[in-house]
Amino acid sequence: MNRIAKFEKVSAKQFAEGWHDIFGTYEGAAEALATIPLPRRATTGSAGYDFALPFDLELKPGQTAKIPTGIRARIDDGWVLMIYPRSGLGFKYRLQLNNTVGVIDSDYYNSSNEGHIFIKITNDSNEGKILSLKAGDCFAQGIFTPFGITEDDEADGLRDGGFGSTSVR
């Protein structure tokens, strides 16, 4: 196995900003960050690193939640972290990521938001199932994947942000 990355928590200040963006308050942010575990694999054969919820969550069918994970990932060049819903939650509730698959590039780590990984999920149940999870429950998984570039690649931009920060148009 290649050891190509390391998970870390974002700073308390950065997490509090993400928390405030979602809840409109800073109350509870420090406590939530303190209890978030770093993503880990459950078994030696697991490909995915499980991400845990920082708060209790209930999603009715069609409802969406934006999750500040409190996590960042230092990733070696040539690798990317792909984020997916936990398989069982996708199977039971049709839990989906709003961007289908999260793509965490290696240069996101150095962004002004410290590379704070947010995961936006939707309960897409067509059977009326309500998804109820507690703080600490795992809801998403990240898999590290190598990638290649074209022979004539000339990318020279610098990232400073998340969604849409690398548009070339």
Image: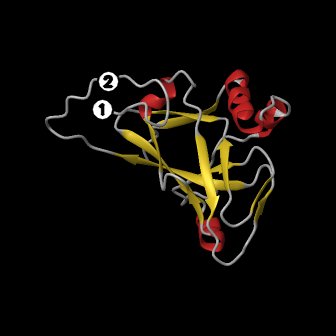
Horizontal placement of 55 versus 86: left or right? right
Label 2 crowd bin: few (<14), some (14–19), many (20+), radius 10 Å: few
Q: Where is residue 133 in the image (x, y as percent from the top left)?
A: 77, 58
Mark count: 2
Q: Is residue 156 above or below residue 8?
A: above
Does the residue at mark 2 contact the one at mark 1 (Cβ under 8 Å)? yes
Residue at horizontal 14 percent and vertical 38 percent from the top: 151
| SS for callout 2 | loop
- Find disc 2 in the rendering and name its residue: 157
Marker disc for residue 94: none
Q: In this view, does 84 lie to the left or right of 95?
A: left
Of labels 2 and 1, earlier in sequence is 2
- Mark 2 vs mark 1, foreground winner is 1
Element marked by disc 1: loop
Measured along the vertical axis of the image, is residue 80 above or below residue 60?
A: above
Alpha carbon separation for disc pair 2 and 1: 9 Å
Residue drawn at (70%, 27%) of the image: 17
Disc 1: CA contacts within 10 A as few (<14), some (14-19) or many (>=20):
few
Can you give x and y, in whole percent of width and height, for residue 51 in the image? 64, 48
Query: Which of the 4 quarters of the picture holds residue 91?
Result: bottom right
Question: Which residue is at 72% across, 48% downward?
Answer: 53
Q: Quadrant of residue 87?
A: bottom right
- Residue at screen point 67% across, 39% down: 68
Q: Quadrant of the C terminus?
A: top left
Mark 2 residue type: Gly
Q: Percent position (x, y) of residue 5?
A: 49, 36
Q: Label 1 sits on what residue type?
A: Val
Res 7 visible: yes
Question: Toward which corner of the image does residue 131 lie, by quadrant?
Answer: bottom right
Left or right of 37 in this view: 31: right
Q: Mark 1 points at which residue?
A: 168
In the image, residue 104 sits, relative to residue 9, either above or below, namely below
